[in-house]
């Protein structure tokens, strides 16, 4: 009897980076989602507990250096070697063979890794090759997958796993055959001198879900059953509006600076230059390239998910970007494990790790977060060892013991919460002002503000005295 088991070894750590870096993610523990098999009679069965157990896990952090808080070139960022490896001892207690499909997320690019150039594609094509997956010490074939993940949001098993799927699946409105119309307009007759930040807007009264994509989108509002989409527009500006789903051609009205409400209209017109039609599949893949290192399917689904995340009232998607940015793509290793009845396999996954950097401390504090909670979805989880190989000092790491190469900590079973520890180049760090941002503000601007207040107060007092003397002389 042979069963086909589908599990997703899923997890990630989400680091909210203070002062100089936005959230970044790294790989983390595994999470079972579902499995399906075939019983002795050949019938397909679903549900029940996944038979594979986690007997032991060893987390090894190799942190010989700290990342910079800014990289100008991709090659410098690629040279950073901080990594984490998760080594699982999996056991199949069943009396039948099991084939396991796994997907392991290894994160987004950290904000201090952004080059804001074409070099970002270099990062996505080269970085995965430095790491990988092994089983019993032998490298196994794995595929790098990509899904959409909103920037500055934490990784969530419930939200991120469904985005990893095969086939062009746009979830409802954003299906391959959905019609997309591109309207190209030219604005004219706008008083740019009086209204340098004038905008054009149009209303939508949808009978069903639809989407609007325009590079100059200023905002969207909903009132009295209508959606008003606005964009910046000066005389001579040419702009395109993509309308996803069936609805009428936009009728543009111009508004003064800061206004898009009734009563703030100004003179202005929009000339329709062209009107073209294409499918959503053509629209979503227009920015895709085979050289990007992202599969056609993943690019399509990621862009569809990006639009779906911008829905207003679950009805109108409003987006100002035609393309996916590398910083909003979650990367995954996808691979398979085959278990014989009663077999034990040692699976090791290595991935880069990027800390939260807080420059408000002296010296700077580097905080690493590793999600442990997703592993609670497995049928059984044994012991956990955490090893930190580093020349630096653990700050506030309760329960860690010093070793020859760094620090270590062990758990009997899966601990509650997540694994969080901080490193610094000195065993003692001085924290930021207890007033946080207010303290920083006062330190930087408090003295000048006080001086200005004294000067203003002095001027007011002198003016009051002169006025008082003048009035007395008149009397």
Image (cartoon, grey):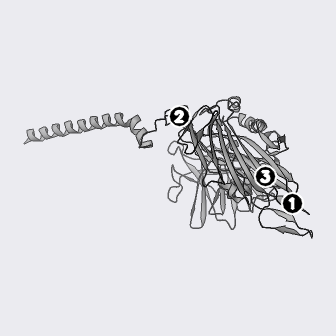
In this rendering, the answer to whether 404 lies above or below 18 is above
> In the image, 407: left or right of 297?
left
Tag 1 secondary structure: strand
Real-space CA distance between mark 1 and mark 2, rounded to the nearest whole angstrom? 49 Å
Nearest the eye: 129 or 443: 129
Q: In this rendering, would 5 be left or right of 413?
A: right
Quickly name the residue at label 3: 90
Question: Residue at label 2?
Answer: 364
For the N terminus, the quadrant is bottom right
- Please report the residue visible at 24 percent of the width from the left and 36 percent of the height from the top: 459
Residue 105 vs 21, above or below: the answer is below
Residue 180 location, x and y as percent?
76, 56
> N-terminal of the two: label 1 or label 3?
1
How far apart are labels 1 and 3 at the CA level?
16 Å
Indicate which disc residue 4 carries: 1
Q: Residues within 10 Å of mark 3 (few under 14, many from 20)?
A: many
Judging from the image, what secondary structure is the residue with disc 3 in? Answer: strand
Across and down, in percent, residue 19 comes to 53, 39
């Amino acid at each position: 009897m042979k069963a086909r088991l589908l599990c997703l070894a899923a997890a990630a750590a989400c680091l909210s980076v203070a002062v100089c870096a936005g959230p970044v993610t790294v790989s983390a523990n595994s999470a079972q989602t579902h499995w399906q098999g075939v019983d002795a009679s050949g019938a397909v069965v679903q549900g029940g507990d996944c038979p594979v157990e986690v007997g032991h896990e060893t987390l090894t952090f190799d942190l010989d250096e700290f990342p910079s808080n800014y990289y100008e070139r991709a090659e410098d960022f690629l040279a950073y070697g901080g990594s984490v490896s998760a080594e699982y001892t999996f056991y199949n207690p069943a009396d039948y063979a099991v084939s396991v499909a796994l997907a392991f997320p290894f994160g987004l690019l950290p904000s201090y890794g952004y080059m804001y150039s074409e070099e970002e594609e270099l990062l996505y094509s080269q970085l995965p090759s430095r790491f990988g997956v092994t089983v019993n010490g032998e490298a196994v074939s794995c595929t790098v997958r990509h899904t959409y993940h909103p920037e500055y949001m934490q990784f969530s098993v419930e939200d991120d796993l469904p985005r990893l799927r095969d086939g062009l699946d746009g979830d409802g409105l954003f299906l391959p055959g959905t019609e997309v119309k591109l309207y190209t307009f030219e604005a004219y007759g706008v008083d740019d001198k009086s209204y340098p930040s004038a905008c054009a807007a149009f209303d939508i009264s949808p009978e069903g879900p639809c989407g609007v994509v325009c590079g100059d989108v200023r905002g969207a509002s909903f009132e009295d059953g209508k959606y008003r989409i606005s964009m910046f527009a000066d005389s001579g500006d040419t702009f395109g509006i993509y309308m996803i789903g069936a609805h009428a051609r936009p009728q543009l009205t111009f508004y003064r600076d800061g206004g898009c409400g009734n009563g703030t209209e100004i003179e202005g017109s929009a000339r329709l230059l062209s009107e073209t039609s294409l499918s959503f599949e053509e629209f979503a893949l227009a920015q895709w390239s085979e050289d990007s290192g992202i599969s056609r399917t993943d690019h399509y689904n990621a862009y569809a998910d990006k639009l779906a995340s911008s829905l207003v009232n679950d009805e109108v998607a409003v987006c100002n970007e035609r393309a996916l940015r590398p910083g909003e793509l979650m990367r995954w290793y996808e691979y398979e494990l085959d278990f014989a009845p009663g077999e034990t396999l040692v699976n090791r996954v290595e991935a880069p790790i990027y800390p939260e950097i807080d420059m408000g401390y002296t010296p700077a504090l580097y905080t690493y977060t590793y999600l442990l909670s997703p592993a609670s979805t497995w049928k059984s989880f044994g012991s956990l060892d955490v090893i930190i190989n580093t020349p630096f000092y653990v700050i506030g790491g309760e329960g860690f013991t010093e070793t020859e190469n760094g620090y270590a900590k062990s758990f009997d079973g899966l601990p509650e919460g997540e694994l969080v520890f901080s490193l610094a180049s000195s065993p003692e760090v001085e924290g930021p002002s207890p007033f946080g941002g207010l303290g920083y503000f006062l330190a930087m601007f408090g003295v000048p503000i006080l001086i200005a207040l004294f000067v203003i107060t002095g001027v007011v007092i002198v003016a009051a005295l002169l006025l008082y003397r003048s009035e007395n002389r008149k009397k």
